Amino acid sequence: MVSSLLGSCKSERQLKEAHGQVIKRDPWPFQSSAASLFLSAYAVSSHGNLDIAMAIFYQMQRPSTFACNSIIRGLAAGKKPANAVLVFSELLRRGFQPNNFTFPFLLKSCAEASLMKPGASIHGLIVKSGQENDCFIRSTLIRFYARGHLADARKVFDECSRRESVSWNSMIDGYVKAGELGEARFVFDRMISRDTISWNTMINGYVIFGDLHQAKNLFQQMPSRSIVSWNSILAGHAKCGDLSGALKVFEEMPKRDVVSWNAMLACYSQSGKPREALELFDLMRRERVKPTDATIVSLLSACGLLGALDQGKAVESFMREQKVQPNTILGTALVDMYAKCGDIEQAEEVFQSLEERDVLAWNTMIAATGMHGQSQRALHLFEEMEASGLPPDDITFVAVLGACSHGGDVERGRLLLNSMEKKYGIKPKLEHYGCLIDLLARAGYLEEALEVIESMPMEPNPGAWGALLGGCKIHGNIRVAEAAGLHLLKLQPNHSGRYVLLSNIYAASRKWEEAGRVRQMMEARCIVKSPGLSLVDKGSVIPSLETPEIFNLYLHPPPQGWDYGAQPSSSWP
């Protein structure tokens, strides 16, 4: 009866109501088998409550092995997995005899909490109890040691007298997570009988580390493919920026789940195809696939890239309708979308409403305010972040140095770069030097900017030289412009913008001969200036127009109802 009652519970409230009914009829509510069943439901179910499970557990005079294993399992999967080991130690002192179900949960908690010494002690208990040959215990031992002691994991694996596929897969997974793909492939090739998990683990390893060629080879060799296999190879194409390959895989998939759709949406957004991402979401809705948080993040990214504020607001309305709680990840995506669409006030409002703010959330808001010219606000946010106790990372400094550049705060920019390593232990990267060079160049400190480029500990990239050349155009410094321009033409000989900018700098200083020489060099190398692009917001339609088309529209207005381009449905979400 209790088992069927628990099976009908779909929420914590229903579980509590069912528990109340049983307690009313049971004179010994904490000593019966029903108590163990409810404890297990509270401890391990998706709608449980670990605090209630612990309260029931400590009311039991003689908890069964099932109850002990349930509480250990719940703690191991909780926010503080180390507590599972503490409870187990207490149970041992009370005479608890662990079985083959106890040890895998304990080893999982030790792996999650990086408790190597307690984990090794549990290994000793396993040997003493004679359970070291249990295939699930052995595979969990391999996964535990693989978290940082691969040699010990391999020793456990090699000592197996009889290896089931779960042990092989655990060893392959350990090598993959450690980045040792050669060793993982060696173990994989030795497997006599591989299952789908073996193939998927190896393919996913190649995908994670960017070896799409090897991933595709294994995928083609698979005797049978699961949806996980298809999703892995799809993610591989997306990770390598192969949009056409990802689309081909997506269209060939015999079956798709929400992970497949999310991977394709992310691929479109990351490949600079936000319009296609929105159109794909329309198709996803027509297929009645329920979106997840990852879906919403990709949609908000697409709206931000397009500057489609109305559609971004529609996504937020969709979140409210579906009662999606704006967690830190979704909140940060909303901040980014509103900032890119020009509504910095709404971005700030969303940011302030976040209950928890991680480094990414702070970085996004700091970058957003800097991008909108609010350099002082960006610096104030940086100070708030420091005061909150959250240490900044290297991306934080890119954002705050960028804000200094937009606000022309040269002195603060210098101080921030100098404090990175001294105060925070963060070694400045090329991006940080690039921000300082841009700041100095915009403010007219061109000689100092050139000194930074020449003295920085890494080879300057085109971005650094480009920032310097841009400053030279603002302040008309021909000498530094020539030095920066020559470096840029060597680094990017096919970049039309570099030639045009240098030629314009010469022309502005009436050095017509030098300007003509740069133009001739451009023509001799068959380099054509790329047309400018604009976005025109026409209701729910945001077509991109090349510059010549803009002039055509101005001279010859289109007839009423003219189709400006592909339109995603205006009704979504």
Image (cartoon, grey):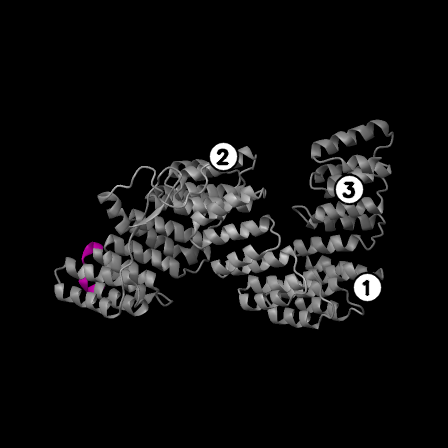
Q: Nearer the viewer, mark 2 or mark 3?
A: 2
Name the one closer to the observer, 59 or 226. Answer: 226
Which label number is shown at residue 317?
A: 2
Is residue 134 one of those drawn in magenta?
Answer: no
Specify the amino acid type for callout 1: Asn
Q: Which quadrant, please, contains the N terminus? A: top right
Q: Residue at left 28%, top 49%?
A: 549
Instruction: Report the number of discs.
Output: 3
149 vs 3: above or below: below
Please report whichever mark, 1 or 3, sits nearer to the chain's N-terminal start: 3
Name the one closer to the observer, 237 or 568. Answer: 568
Q: Residues within 10 Å of mark 1 (few under 14, many from 20)?
A: some
303 vs 254: above or below: above
Magenta residues span: 474-480
Name the one closer to the observer, 350 or 514. Answer: 514
Residue 235 in the image, given as x and y percentages of width and height: 55, 57
Which label number is shown at residue 133?
A: 1
Q: Which residue is mark 3?
A: 40
The answer for how far apart the CA atoms under marks 2 and 3 are is 38 Å
Element under disc 2: helix
Specify the amino acid type for callout 2: Ser
Please report whichever mark, 2 or 3, sits nearer to the chain's N-terminal start: 3
Q: Quadrant of residue 385?
A: top left
Which label number is shown at residue 259?
A: none
Q: Quadrant of residue 481?
A: bottom left
Residue 163 in the image, given as x and y percentages of width and height: 77, 67
The answer for how far apart the CA atoms under marks 1 and 3 are is 27 Å
Residue 379 in the image, given as x and y percentages of width and height: 37, 45
Q: Does residue 225 appear in this view?
A: yes
Side of 301 relative to 45 (left or right)? left
